[in-house]
Image: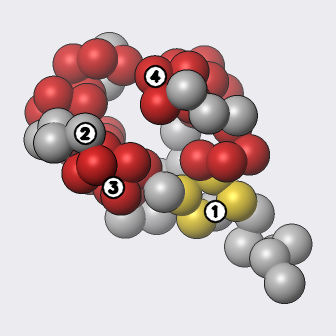
Amino acid sequence: MRNRIAALRAERGWTQADLAKRIGVSRQSVNAIETGRFDPSLPVAFRLARLFGLAVEEVFTDEQTDG
């Protein structure tokens, strides 16, 4: 699954640690999600989307359905 988290975070001037604190996970988890090594749980995905003011589908995309 691809995501826009690194770009959205950078637009706000937040570090990975800043984002991790805002959504209640470790900085290592943020790094793993951003790099695609780990897919977040649904609650974390929804917290991320809500934090950025976007729908989950605007933050995360399924690689298999991208055209």
CA separation in Å, label 1 and label 2 = 23 Å
CA separation in Å, label 4 and label 3 = 13 Å
Q: Looking at the picture, how far across and down is residue 11, in whole percent?
A: 28, 49
Q: Looking at the picture, how far across and down is residue 48, in whole percent?
A: 49, 29
Which of the marked residues, 1 or 2, is nearer the chain's N terminus? 1
The quarter of the displayed image where residue 56 is located: top right
Q: Nearer the viewer, mark 3 or mark 1?
A: 3
Chosen colour scheme:
secondary structure
Which of the marked residues, 4 or 1, is nearer the chain's N terminus? 1
Quarter of the figure that contains the N terminus: bottom right
| Residue underneath mark 3 | 6
| Residue underneath mark 2 | 12
Nearer the observer, 22 or 10: 10
Figure check: 31 above or below 18: below
| Residue underneath mark 1 | 1
- Mark 3 Cα-neighbour bin, 10 Å: few <14, some 14–19, many ≥20: some
Nearer the observer, 1 or 10: 10
Q: Provide the secondary structure element on which disc 4 rests.
A: helix
Q: In this rendering, would 4 be left or right of 32?
A: right
Instruction: Indicate the amino acid at tag 4.
Output: Leu
Mark drawn on residue 19:
none
Total numbered badges shown on the rendered structure: 4
Instruction: Indicate the amino acid at tag 1.
Output: Met
Q: In this rendering, would 26 be left or right of 62?
A: left
Quarter of the figure that contains the C terminus: bottom right
| Residue underneath mark 4 | 51
